[in-house]
Image (spheres, grey):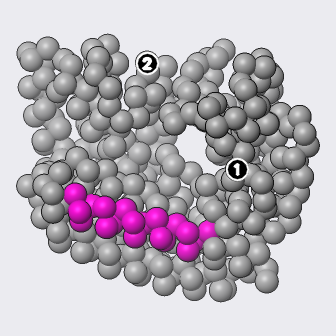
Amino acid sequence: MNVDQAIQRARAWVEQQSTHIPGFHGAFLAGSLTRMPPNTPLEPWRDVDVVVVTTDPGSVQGDRLELSLDGIIFECGVLSDEPFRSPEGILSSAEHADNLAAGVILADPTGSLQKLHAQVVAEYARRRWVQARCDSRKEYIGRRMRQAREALAADNFPAVFMHFYVAMSLLVGLTAQADAKPLTLRRGFVLSGELLESWGRADLHEEALALLGSAHLSREEVEQFLAHFDEAFELAVRVKRKPIHYDFKFQRHLRPYYVDGTREMLQEGRHREAIYWIIGYCYQAWLVLLNDAPEALQQPHLERLVSFFEKLDVLPTSDWASRLDRLQDVVARFSAAIDERIRTQPGLFD
């Protein structure tokens, strides 16, 4: 299976499903596949991201659909057409600008998505819009940091950890946005590191890794943690009963998405960066085990979770006030570097 074949399978699936979605307005491809050569082999850990647009508010889905078709991991979101009514709204937001600039349209009954693509791709690398997308992301980071502090004051560790984790993802994504490059979630820290190193700002990458807690980890430690997560995920999928955040991500066919996709980064020598990809989902997997696994199976996994979080210094008893202060300082330095890059990036235009 190659990228082109996967896209054709997605197009066929959208055609099949479109008659069952009230207000179906079209669909487009999202994620890394939009920029890959058509004949690129599709690794088993890569997913095919599909965005469906609807004019019917009742058809909008809060959670994404995860499924496996012909051995391909599919993820589909059903969104309102409201954000897609003007190019300005898309160009100033990081969420869909790159995907619509790439313009892999899977279905477009009215022709509006193709028209929107033409408008977005013409303006995508204009400095005004690159700055707007970065500023929007900075505001979101600030909001997450405030929410983390509020959760800390309320002694709500799960919320502190979640807001911190999301803020870190948003932070490293700024580097790709400043260069008008596609965003990536799984390889977010890897791409950010590569870009910062090319800018002569490897110091910022090291600061981000230190904040994450992985700067000092060896490859052997990360490999051991990945093996522990693999076991926890397999068990969590079997025993899960109670709902948790990101329920749709706990399905057996997604194992390559987490485990094999992480190994790819380890093989590249980016083990410290790989921690970001797995840490959030491992936490969720262990929560499932604590909620739903037989008591006899809980203890070894709890001990592993505590040991791992201790290595990262992200336990509930860690000094989160100081960590959030450090995050604020690093965000300020990232922000200054991002603004400078936008001013000087030769690939952008005024």
For image coordinates 37% across by 50% down, the residue present is 276
Give the residue type that dot 2 points to. Answer: Arg
For image coordinates 70% across by 50% down, the residue present is 82
Which sits earlier in the primary sequence, circle 2 or circle 1? 1
Please tell me whether mark 1 sits on a helix, a strand or a loop: helix
**Residue of label 1:** 82
Q: Is residue 6 rendered to the left or right of residue 225?
A: right
Q: Up-down: is 127 above or below 213? A: below
| Stretch in magenta | 133-151
Name the quadrant of the C terminus. Answer: bottom right
Q: Nearer the viewer, residue 231 or 66?
A: 66
Give the image location of residue 273, x and y in percent.
Answer: 40, 54
Give the image location of residue 65, x and y in percent.
Answer: 56, 27
Give the image location of residue 277, x and y in percent.
Answer: 41, 45
Q: Residue 317 carries which label?
A: none
Few, some or many C-alpha atoms within 10 Å of disc 1 (few <14, some 14-19, many ≥20)?
A: few
For image coordinates 13% across by 32% down, the residue present is 302
**Residue of label 2:** 252
Q: Which of 90 and 349 is in front in this view?
A: 90
Q: Main secondary structure of the magenta part?
A: helix
Give the residue type that dot 1 points to. Answer: Glu
Q: Up-down: is 234 above or below 77? A: above
Give the image location of residue 247, x and y in percent.
Answer: 40, 29
Q: Nearer the viewer, residue 143 or 2?
A: 143
Name the quadrant of the N terminus. Answer: top right
Query: Is 144 contained in the magenta span?
Result: yes
Of circles 2 and 1, the one toward us is 1
